[in-house]
Amino acid sequence: MLEAQLEPYTQLRDNMARRDRSLREKVMSLEEAASFVQDGMKVGLGGSTMSRTPMAMIWEVIRQRRKNLSVSRCIISTDGDLLFGSGASDHIISSWFAQGILWGLSKVMRHHVETQGKRFEEWSHMAVGMRYRAGGMGVPFLPTRAMLGSDVMKQRPEAKQIDCPFTGEKLLLVPALNPDVALIHVQRCDAYGNAQIDGLQFMDIDLALAANSVILTTERIVSNDQIRRAPDHTKIPFFCVDAVVEVPYGSAPHECYGLYEPMMNHMEAYVSQVNSDPVDGMRDYLEKYVYGPKSWTEYLSLIGMEELLDASQKGRSIYND
Amino acid sequence: MLEAQLEPYTQLRDNMARRDRSLREKVMSLEEAASFVQDGMKVGLGGSTMSRTPMAMIWEVIRQRRKNLSVSRCIISTDGDLLFGSGASDHIISSWFAQGILWGLSKVMRHHVETQGKRFEEWSHMAVGMRYRAGGMGVPFLPTRAMLGSDVMKQRPEAKQIDCPFTGEKLLLVPALNPDVALIHVQRCDAYGNAQIDGLQFMDIDLALAANSVILTTERIVSNDQIRRAPDHTKIPFFCVDAVVEVPYGSAPHECYGLYEPMMNHMEAYVSQVNSDPVDGMRDYLEKYVYGPKSWTEYLSLIGMEELLDASQKGRSIYND
Amino acid sequence: MTEAHSYTASEMLAILSARQLRDGQVVFAGIGVPLLAATLAQRTRCPALTILFEGGVIGAFVEPGKLPPSTNDQRCTKRANMVLGSADVLLLLQRGYVDVGFMGGAQIDQYGNLNSSFIGDPAKPKTRLPGTGGGNDISSLTNMIVAMKHEKRRFVENVDFITSPGFIRGGDTRRESGLPAGGMFRVITELAVFGFDDTSKRMKVLALNPGVSREEVQDNTGFTLQFDDRTEVTPPPTEHELQTLRLLDPERLFTA
Amino acid sequence: MTEAHSYTASEMLAILSARQLRDGQVVFAGIGVPLLAATLAQRTRCPALTILFEGGVIGAFVEPGKLPPSTNDQRCTKRANMVLGSADVLLLLQRGYVDVGFMGGAQIDQYGNLNSSFIGDPAKPKTRLPGTGGGNDISSLTNMIVAMKHEKRRFVENVDFITSPGFIRGGDTRRESGLPAGGMFRVITELAVFGFDDTSKRMKVLALNPGVSREEVQDNTGFTLQFDDRTEVTPPPTEHELQTLRLLDPERLFTA
């Protein structure tokens, strides 16, 4: 298990050497981009909790009936529910897995972990970040001072406690995490994949650098000229990116900084339905909202115009001052 | 020597606990700020080569006749000359030390290293960065894959080569560098020290986090309201900063991104003077430009209005498109 | 107590928690009561207090009536001094920039260890809880204030699972585990304010909440509590505290 | 050669170096001839070439006539795709995003090791040179092209000091030193284009520059050179290459 997770450097470099990192347009549809996600892969998700969740891409991956995905995200919420509930994933790596602070425990997660043998592999929030960062730096580990002494550490033989060769202090070395594919949603990028991210970055930059391929969904595709006018606003460079998909409201019903807040009526209804019946409630939700719609636009229509407008009005208010 | 460089974690934390990190105004003069720099201290310099060099603060430190400073900078140029030549520093840690690519070798550096017993301690550029980054993260080292097999590594017993406990690969652990004080020049910050840096960041963010105190010089002090309107543009948080000094053209005769390019006539004259006579030429330069002027403004007057205007016109052209 | 019915238990928690903060501190606050309490402190006694959120926010000013649904949402960033990556904001704890970590708790033990991962045997858990989030990082790297509900099943002798370390097994075991900095500083409940013995690192009662007896606290606690000789009684919430708090959370999202 | 006096040695260097690049590559370029050569390639055969600079620049488009004084100056960023920290741009090499590192050299040896630190004994140097800069990082972590002046004192059997590693002591010693990726790929001088033997990792001549004999190359080299059976002669600079190059550097800052 551990061996499978930590790629030797030569393999990491070989994978990279094979990747097409040339300056080229890579705009495609959700359907096409989903081909980068194959059964059994390690998938890293951008954003955190209910923010900039790459929901449209997750939605498409579930529609394409992927299986056995090992999914990592710094903090995972209803996206984790959908991945477990649909059968797309049987292993989630995260620091926290619930339906959001307002609703607490996920009965879906509990059902799948407590009775279905699925795995929720827990690391501290910083440790998840250091694992991506090590992956993005091309080193096999980073040293940290968290998790020491806790049972969280004792459950993670993948990490190694050492005595610092300089100071003798106890340190925990957390292994690099290089997902096979990262799904990241951004406010805007160009056709090459040069991406700007407004506001909260979470771990997306490290994740993009660490992953062996990146699917970028974006609220809006802008010209390369626009990117080049403010090169210090680019957060992810194009050569990390393998697919660009324009998906307005691509984090719905979660939020996207500066554009829309979470769609709370939909979230409330969702939580009530799946927490009251994590099996049938989830099945019905997936049928209606994931498998049912013919397109992402049709999915947004099901959430409803009023929700979208309200979330957008609240989303833009971050800039009012 | 090594022990002195790497602070144990408890000492690092004790130093930090004593620091006043409250939200408070800390605007002062160059003269007052220089009191943070004491003889024998480890001083980290922001910027790189000829860019965003904290020249005004260096100038003031030399004027106040500081001695035995151990100075680190990712790439050091004529600022290193002045620090060696004035006697302020006898130890410079850097990846590259010359007068700038256009002029090559520094005869001042050569004089002081080859015949005066001063130390130019060489690390790879990335290694300098990883040393600051480790310092900023509060860990005693970071692993890297550079310097291995080279004589640069063999000259640095401060670093440790290990076999990776995960993969068995050879790695170099570079020790954290936590300067006693960092001098950093920025385009703008507020009175608390919340700083925005446009364009090239170099290693300034890691350096600011790593240092046990930070003196920020800034082209312009702006309101806290302005900072808060775009919190994702803040690059250094106020609680890292111990002094804020407003110094227009504070990097002169070097450049400051988006505001002015290097003042090339002055640089040419400087290089010609000190390279032709690294002792007397340097002494004369220091007398005229460092010890002589009554103020930074008088120093700028010596460089001359035409140079300033020309450099400013070129500096702003980065935004023309 | 004439005030007995004029505030909820959660309001009491938030107000007593806010009183633990000092002006000028840098506080890493979790969602819910911690966020409310830190904001309350900032708007009453501590204008130079700096609040950090796990999502990557420094110096937030939460807008009254617009509480964020988590510390990873954009509402946390309004009028902040800085927004940065979430690994980077957690690293500030490791470097030592943070004075106080402030969070809620589901289960705590005599040494201040917190469990938010498992009820029952982790190998075959009765309940899989949400996990640590940043809790482990915060409690490993700084001084902690925990605000939580006081129930016997939540105040246990030893937690089923140490998610966020307090003093581990007491004495020097925290330091010996590689955590030389920080530790549990205060636990605030609707019954009392707790500290920890300097040597044994066991929880002790520092002050009783108004109208609460020693017996009531002990009866609701799953281990034997130590009481200070000078155990005080906390002054009740003031009108100013209550008004400010209710302005922050008019919908009682976190103070019902 | 009719072209013999129509271009300078530096122009020849820049043009032959540019020819080593392929479209779509990600190239980490040093200042001077490397920057010029990469820009020349980008403006002739390789529009999808990406240039990285050590100062923290991705996808730069250097403006003709406005060459930067170093790769750490703002002129490098004009119309770039991204500006980032200088440690971060170097880490891209370590992660493997870069195809080619491209720099100048002061002294090189038979195994492609470069010295830019010391002339003479490092403990008591005759000359203290400027040092590695990013050179050590680049040559440790990717495939290298080096453009340099061909003089006997610069092409030595073993460098005084390995600043930037080539193949160390030949054979597998680079890999054994912990550098499994990259290595010296090409050396370009005003006399010839060099590669390295697959097994011994010693420098060999791949192609002679126009009008240069084997003897001339060997006479200017401080160690015995291997010549390929099929050693070719490089076609001279074309008018288009020369014109484009001169447009980039009209003041001959780097091509005098």
Image (tube, coloured by chain):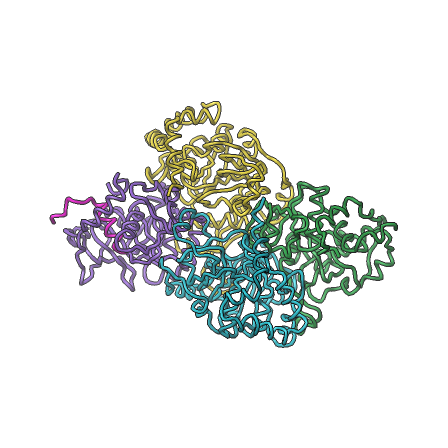
Chain colours: A yellow, B cyan, C purple, D green
Judged left or right of residue B122, residue A109 is: left
Q: Is residue D216 depicted above or below A47 in this figure?
A: below
- Residue A258 point in image, percent of width and height: 42, 39
Task: Determine the residue located farthest toward the left in the rendered image.
Answer: C2
Q: Is residue C26 magenta?
A: no
Q: Is residue D135 depicted above or below B290 in this figure?
A: above
- Residue C69 point in image, percent of width and height: 34, 40
- Residue D126 point in image, percent of width and height: 70, 72
Nearest the viewer among C151 and A262 is A262
Judged left or right of residue C211, residue A12 is: right
Residue D171 occupies quadrant:
bottom right
Judged left or right of residue B125, residue B66 is: left
Residue B157 occupies quadrant:
bottom right
Task: Determine the residue located farthest toward the front in the rendered image.
Answer: B305
Judged left or right of residue B184, residue C160 is: left
Q: Is residue B111 depicted above or below A41 in this figure?
A: below
- Residue D77 point in image, percent of width and height: 59, 49
Q: Is residue C19 magenta?
A: yes
Q: Magenta span covers which residues?
A: C1-20
Q: Is residue C31 visible?
A: yes
What residue is at 32 percent from the left and 55 percent from the top? C49
Nearest the viewer among D176 and D242 is D242
